[in-house]
């Protein structure tokens, strides 16, 4: 009986993670498949968890609290994994805006949110990197190791956790701006030059002419700097397992 309770609680933590895990969302893998995978992971790894509560001393209220906090722990870890894609969403939107691609046709991306072509390219690039660098395995290992830092039912909401999440959100915006900064700089330069030309030659329709120039420059700069973007994205992705452990430690109140 205790073994099945442990498997169920591990299923909640891994299930909360896999429900919003970016690779599964991008591939549109059904929720039932994600939950089945979480249950399988719980069955396989349950024997390696040593930090178990005293089941006999727990009442119904205690069990309800443990279930809630285990699910919250999984969702928090899933959000940490997904933040890199939020950063890429910001980078893609900024790239589209500054290169003039915002007037083109949108594609249905993650969760059906309309996204421009740069976002799709960056999403696919990050997904390939996660698989190529075996980060998905490291994430599972990090969640397993999190039971040492965050025992079952040991989570708590406090100011330190809010500050930590605020820091991560700030990093998301900073990363998005850093990735899109070459295209943003090119767009600003094109607008500045076209503004000068508009004042020098009043007969030129600067607003109409700038669209094609911004589009060419934006696509060119995006293609020329995609390798630098990939290095920056790879560094962010490598930090995910360690960030998961830090989040687990802070959620535990340590």
Image: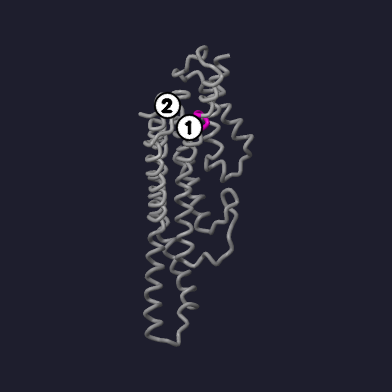
Real-space Cα separation, disc 2 to disc 1, in angstroms: 9 Å
- Membership of 190 in magenta stretch: no
Q: Of the numbered discs in the image, which one, if any, rests on residue 117?
A: none
**In the picture shown, does residue 22 fall above or below 116?**
above
Q: Mark 2 points at which residue?
A: 150
Q: How crowded is mark 2: few (under 14 residues within 10 Å), some or many (20 or more)?
A: many
Front position in the image: 238 or 2:
2
Q: Which residue is drawn at 57% across and 43% down?
A: 25
Q: Name the residue under label 1.
A: 73
State which tag comes first along the sequence, 2 or 1. 1
Q: How crowded is mark 1: few (under 14 residues within 10 Å), some or many (20 or more)?
A: many
Position of residue 149 in the picture relative to residue 6 (left or right): left
Position of residue 241 in the picture relative to residue 29 (left or right): left
Provide residue 235's location: percent of width, then percent of height.
38, 45
Front position in the image: 157 or 70:
157
Q: Which residue is drawn at 36% across and 79% down?
A: 196
Provide residue 101's location: percent of width, then percent of height.
51, 65
Which quadrant would residue 61 be assigned to in this image? Answer: top right
Q: Which residue is drawn at 63% across and 39% down?
A: 30
Q: Mark 2 falls on what kind of element?
A: loop
User: Which residues make up the magenta segment?
Assistant: 69-73
Q: Mark 1 falls on what kind of element?
A: helix
Provide residue 145's location: percent of width, then percent of height.
42, 27
Position of residue 47 in the picture relative to residue 250 (left or right): right
Q: Which residue is drawn at 47% across and 82% down?
A: 205
For the view shown, which residue lies furthest in the front direction?
61
Is the stretch drawn in magenta largely helix, strand or loop? helix
Tags 2 and 1 in contact by the CB under 8 Å rule? yes
Q: In which quarter of the image is the N terminus?
A: top right
Provide residue 228's location: percent of width, then percent of height.
38, 54
**In the picture shown, does residue 213 fall above or below 3?**
below
């Amino acid at each position: 009986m205790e073994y099945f309770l442990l498997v169920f609680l591990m299923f909640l933590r891994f299930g909360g993670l896999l429900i919003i895990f970016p690779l599964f969302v991008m591939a549109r893998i059904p929720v039932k498949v994600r939950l089945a995978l979480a249950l399988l992971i719980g069955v396989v790894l349950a024997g390696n968890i040593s930090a178990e509560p005293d089941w006999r001393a727990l009442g119904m209220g205690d069990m309800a609290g443990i279930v809630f906090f285990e699910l919250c722990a999984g969702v928090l870890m899933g959000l940490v994994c997904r933040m890199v894609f939020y950063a890429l969403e910001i980078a893609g939107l900024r790239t589209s805006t500054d290169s003039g691609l915002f007037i083109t046709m949108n594609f249905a991306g993650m969760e059906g949110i309309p996204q421009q072509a740069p976002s799709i390219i960056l999403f696919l690039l990050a997904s390939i990197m996660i698989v190529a660098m075996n980060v998905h395995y490291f994430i599972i290992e990090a969640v397993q190791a999190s039971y040492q830092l965050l025992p079952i039912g040991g989570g708590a909401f406090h100011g330190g956790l809010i500050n930590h999440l605020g820091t991560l959100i700030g990093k998301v915006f900073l990363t998005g701006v850093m990735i899109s900064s070459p295209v943003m700089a090119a767009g600003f330069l094109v607008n500045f030059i076209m503004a000068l030309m508009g004042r020098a030659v009043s007969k030129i329709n600067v607003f109409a002419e700038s669209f094609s120039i911004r589009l060419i420059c934006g696509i060119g700069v995006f293609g020329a700097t995609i390798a630098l973007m990939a290095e920056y994205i790879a560094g962010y992705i490598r930090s995910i397992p360690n960030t998961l452990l830090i989040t687990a430690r802070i959620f535990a109140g340590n």
